[in-house]
Image: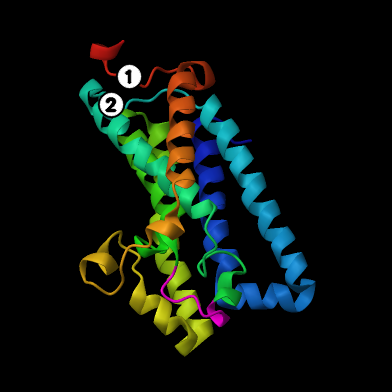
Amino acid sequence: MLDGINALLAATVIFVGGHFFLSSLPVRAWIIERLGAGGFRGLYALVAGGSMIWMLIAYGAAPYVEVWPEVMALRWVALLAMPIAFVLVVCGMTTRSPTAIGGEALLDMPRVPLPGILRVTRHPALWGVAIWAICHLLVNGDAASVIFMGGFLVLTLGGMQHIDARREATLGAAWGPTKIRSSAIPFAALLSRRTEMDWSGLGWWRPLLGLLLYAVFLGGHTVFFGVSPFPPALM
């Protein structure tokens, strides 16, 4: 029976590894051939959701084992970066994208270059989660947090490359315009003038909603998670 850090490590490996394994082209094709597209999505959701729940429970139950001492000043970094993370996640989750599940159909529509936040990066939500993971790695130096946040960081950064490689392999030339007129690295396509910012596609309500959610989580962080996010100077 696994417990403590070992349980968290096992859950994290299954959570992260399950995403990459099930979404790999040979495995995905094999499962769809036997269970159909709906069956594949159901299995994927079961593995991802079940392992994430296990991961959260194991993280909450894991003992505190210090890897490096907490640097309270780094909480300022999190306070400044987390609003960006929330905005990216909200914008990414509310903008239809060819990198999302089932988003391949958008490539058949005359919508290149991509709208809104996708001009900044074609993986906005994943970058938002990556920033969240980095921020919490900086302010939490215990083994459980390193495993938990590190798992999300591997999943998001590796997931971007995995998604792009899978799209290119399956879509061929149809992926070309999206690849050329957008970038995985934030602002790379804009700075190289391969696209221009689409402010109307971004809208005003997406960034506002992201900032409002940030304010809610910031204000309720102590209640929700039992830890104050503020540096000592603000406490």
Label 1 Cα neighbours within 10 Å, binned few <14 / some 14-19 / many ≥20: some
Classify 222 as above or below 95: above
Q: Secondary structure at mark 2?
A: helix
Q: Quadrant of the N terminus?
A: top right
From the image, tell me which residue sits under label 2.
75
Whether residue 152 is visible: no
Whether residue 172 is visible: yes
Q: How is the image coloured?
A: rainbow
- Name the disc covering residue 107, or none: none
Q: Which x, y percent locates residue 191?
A: 21, 65
- Name the disc covering residue 230, or none: 1
In the image, farthest residue toward the front: 200
Q: Residue at the spot x=39%, y=40% of the render?
A: 132
Classify 100 as above or below 127: below
Magenta stretch, residue numbers? 107-114
Could you tell me the amino acid type at mark 2?
Arg
Snapshot quadrant of residue 231? top left
Could you tell me the amino acid type at mark 1?
Phe
Residue 110 included in the magenta stretch of the image:
yes
Q: Which x, y percent locates residue 26?
A: 59, 78
Q: Quadrant of the C terminus?
A: top left
Q: Residue at the spot x=41%, y=64% of the render?
A: 122
Q: Residue at the spot x=38%, y=57% of the render?
A: 199
In the image, farthest residue toward the bottom: 173
Residue 61 included in the magenta stretch of the image:
no
Snapshot quadrant of residue 67? top left
Q: Which x, y percent locates residue 50?
A: 67, 45
Mark 1–mark 2 distance (CA, rounded to whole Å)? 6 Å
Q: Which x, y percent locates residue 38?
A: 76, 67
Camera-side residue of 98 and 21: 98
First in residue order: circle 1 vs circle 2:
2
Classify 35 as above or below 204: below
